[in-house]
């Protein structure tokens, strides 16, 4: 009986759960057409906009810089009005990587969607009267319209 158990275990051990699968191509629109290289958006332009957004956030006027099609725009604006201390400010400490994600041509220019990494801090006076600093590390996707000669 002992040999039967050992023999059964010996037969089970070499078998593995993995198996080979045949790769099937994904049905789609066919080969991708080569796209034109994306033109980089000037970093200074993006940095200026980031600081404008921070100033608008601090001045409770974020509505002026948000696009009309910003997801959950009304919800964000309501949350900012209710959830922040009156004296809260957003200070930009640094603007990191700026990467152009996509571009759409216009008759006199282009619109680019740009990913920008932002490091900042929210500053406000706490209930104890002490300055509170909350660090932030964020990724923003901004839409930049440019005239191109």
Image: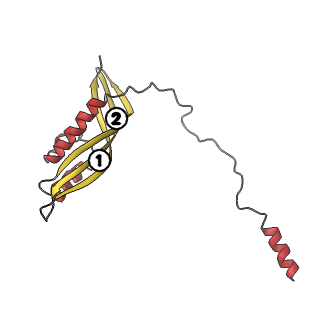
Are dots 1 and 2 in contact, CB under 8 Å?
no
Please report the residue visible at 67 percent of the width from the left and 45 percent of the height from the top.
23
Q: Earlier in the sequence, mark 1 or mark 2?
A: 1
Above-or-below relation of 42 to 138? above
Residue 113 marker: 2
Secondary structure, mark 2, is strand
Work out how far the residue at label 1 is from the one at label 2, CA to CA, in angstroms.
15 Å
Please report the residue visible at 39 percent of the width from the left and 33 percent of the height from the top.
102
Residue 59: give x, y in percent of width and height. Answer: 13, 46
Nearest the eye: 55 or 102: 55
Residue 18: give x, y in percent of width and height. Answer: 70, 58
On-image quarter of the N terminus: bottom right
Residue 71 marker: 1
- Tally the numbered discs: 2
Please report the residue visible at 80 percent of the width from the left and 73 percent of the height from the top.
9
Which residue reaches farthest bottom?
Answer: 1
Residue 16: give x, y in percent of width and height. Answer: 74, 61
The scheme the figure's colours follow is: secondary structure
Which residue reaches farthest top?
Answer: 149
Secondary structure, mark 1, is loop
Residue 98: give x, y in percent of width and height. Answer: 35, 35
Taking the image as shown, residue 103 lies to the left or right of residue 68, namely right
On-image quarter of the C terminus: top left
Which residue reaches farthest front?
Answer: 130
């Amino acid at each position: 009986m002992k040999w039967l158990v050992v023999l059964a275990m010996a037969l089970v051990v070499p078998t593995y759960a993995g198996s080979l699968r045949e790769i099937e191509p994904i049905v789609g629109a066919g080969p991708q057409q080569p796209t034109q290289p994306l033109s980089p958006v000037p970093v200074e332009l993006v940095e200026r906009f980031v600081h404008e957004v921070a100033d608008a956030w601090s001045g409770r006027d974020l509505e002026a810089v948000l696009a009309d099609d910003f997801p959950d725009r009304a919800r964000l604006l309501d949350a900012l009005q209710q959830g922040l201390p009156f004296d809260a400010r957003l200070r930009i400490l640094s603007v990191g990587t700026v990467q152009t994600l996509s571009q759409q041509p216009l008759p006199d220019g282009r619109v680019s969607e740009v990913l920008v990494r932002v490091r900042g801090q929210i500053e406000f006076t706490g209930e104890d009267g002490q300055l509170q600093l909350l660090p932030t590390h964020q990724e923003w996707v901004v839409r930049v319209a440019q005239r191109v000669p």
